[in-house]
Image (spheres, coloured by chain):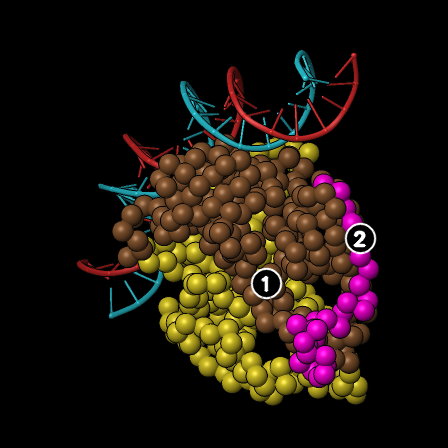
Chain colours: A brown, B yellow, C red, D cyan
Amino acid sequence: MLGANLRGEARPNRQHLPLRECSQDPLQAIEAIASLSSWRRSEAIDRRVDPHAHLYRVVSGAARACALRSDGRRQILDFLLPSDFFGFAAPDGHDVTVEAMVEDTRVARYPRARLEMLADFDPQLGRRLREVAFKAIARLQTRMLILGRMTALERVGCFLVEMAERSACSVGGAVVLPMSRYDIADYLGLSAETVSRCMTDLKHRGAIVLRGTRFRIVNRRALESWHDPGGPS
Amino acid sequence: MLGANLRGEARPNRQHLPLRECSQDPLQAIEAIASLSSWRRSEAIDRRVDPHAHLYRVVSGAARACALRSDGRRQILDFLLPSDFFGFAAPDGHDVTVEAMVEDTRVARYPRARLEMLADFDPQLGRRLREVAFKAIARLQTRMLILGRMTALERVGCFLVEMAERSACSVGGAVVLPMSRYDIADYLGLSAETVSRCMTDLKHRGAIVLRGTRFRIVNRRALESWHDPGGPS
DNA sequence: CGTAGTCTTGAGTATCCTCAACGAGGGTGG
DNA sequence: CCACCCTCGTTGAGGATACTCAAGACTACG
C-alpha cells in the first residue's frame, strides 16, 4: 500500500471538453464503481487495509499509512493527500493501517475485482493504473534514498520540500502540516525530538519560516544542501 | 526502477501443459519482443536506465540497482536476481545505474511501447504487469521498514533471510552471496564495517554458519529476533 | 609468490536516541 | 470566564549505536 500523487498531471477540465470522451483521463472511468466514505481524525480506515479487496484514493483531508510492530516501533510508509491512491500492496508479513489525520477525511473505495474487469475492456485504463503504480514505485525509491543515506537535517529538509510541492497551495507559500512531529519522525526514521531540533535549526539558518503547524520555505537551496552554503557542487 | 521477484508464483511447465494456451502465464507473451544482452562483472547495463524506453528482466547472474549522489554516497535500491524485473521507474531527480555483479549476467530488454501495445490487446498480460508492479511495491515497503526502524543487527539478519529465500538453492541451504560487504552496506544503509561486525556477531550467536562468501542459516529465529533468545514475544 | 581487492577487527568519535522537564495551545467542565 | 487537563512541541543532558579512520588478515588471481 502506498500513495501515488497525481497532482501535476494533465487532467482535462470536464466542463470545457465535453465533446470527445477520449480526451478525458481514462482514470475517471473508475469513479463509476467508487464508494465514498468519511472518517474522523485518528480513525483507522477499513481497519487493516486488505490489498486484495480494494484500491483506495483520498478525496479530501489527509491520512497516514502505518506499519506497526509488536514492540511498539512504527514506520509511516506514506502520507496520503487528496488525489493520492493507496492500497496497492502491503509489505510481506506486516499489517498496514491507514489512519485519517484530519477530521472528515473522505476516501473513495474501488473494488479490485471490478477495477480489473473495467481494465480488461478499457486498455487505456489498464495503462493508467500501471502508470499510477510506477509513480508509486518512483516515490518509494526516493524515500529509500532518504531513509538509507541522509542525515537528520537532510531528511527533514527533503520532507519539507516534498510537502511544499505536494500541497497545492503554491501561492505565497505558507504550507500547513497536517501531521504531528511524531508522525514526521516515524516517516523519516527519526525520533520526534530530533525532528523538532532540525526544524528549529533550519529556522535559525534562515531556510524556513516556522510558526506552529505552518511553515514557509525561504531558502530552498539551504534546505537541500545544508552543509554547503554556496549550493550543491 | 526496482526488482520484482517472481519466484514462487505458479508457473506451469511448458513441456507438460502444451494443450491449452490459456493455462500459461500471460507474461510469457512478452518474450516475443525481448532482446537479450550479456554483461561483464561491474559493467553498467544500458548506462543510465531510462524507465521510459525499456523494461528489463534478469535472466541469469545478478545485478545491483544503484543511486549515486554527487558527494559519493551510494544507495543500492535493489539486488536483482534471475527472473526479477527492473526499470519500472526511477526516483525523481536521481539517475539509477544497474550494474552486473557477476560475470556474464544476462538481461532481457523489453521495449516499453511494444509492451504496452501487447497489453492493449491482451488484458491478461496487462493484469500480470500490474501484479508485478504491485509486488515490487510490497517489496519496497518491506525495505522501508528495514531502513527506517531497524538496528544494524536486525538489518543484516533480515537481509540474510531475504537472500536465503530469494536464492532458489533451498536444499541443504548453503547460500552464496554474489555481492560484496560494501554492496550489502549500501543496500542496508550501513557501513561495510558494521555489516562485517554484525555478520561475525550472528556467527558467534550461532544464528548462521559463515565461510567467506557462503553462509547457511542455522537458527532463523535468532536472526529475526536477536534480542530475545526465547523467540519473539 | 606477490599483488590487489576484500574482509575483519580495533579505537575513538559523532550523530542521534532516550529520558526528563518545561511551555504552549485547545478543549472541557465548573 | 477561568481553572484544569491533555496532547503536542521544544529544549537540555547523558548515553548508545553506528561511523570513521586505520591496520592487519584472508582470498583470488596473475
Residue A154 image point, x, y percent: 42, 46
Amino acid at circle 1: Arg
Question: At 66% from the left edge and 56% from the top edge, which residue is drawn?
Answer: A82
As rendered, which of B143 and A147 lies closer to the eye?
A: A147
Question: At 53% from the left edge and 41% from the top edge, which residue is drawn?
Answer: A214
In the visual, does A58 lie left or right of B156? right
At mark 1, the secondary structure is loop
Q: Chain of mark 2?
A: A
Q: Is residue B105 above or below residue A194?
A: below
In the visual, does A170 lie left or right of A153? right
| Residue A115 visible in image | yes
As rendered, which of C27 and B233 lies closer to the eye?
A: C27
Residue B168 image point, x, y percent: 60, 64
Q: Are marks 2 and 1 in contact (CB under 8 Å)?
A: no
Specify which label sits upstream in the sequence, 2 or 1.
Answer: 1
Q: What's the mark number on residue A37? A: 2
Figure quadrant of the C terminus of chain B: top right
As rendered, which of A118 and B69 lies closer to the eye?
A: A118
Q: Is residue A93 above or below residue B133?
A: above
Residue B101 among those drawn in magenta: no
Residue B198 image point, x, y percent: 46, 42
Residue receiving disc 1 = A7
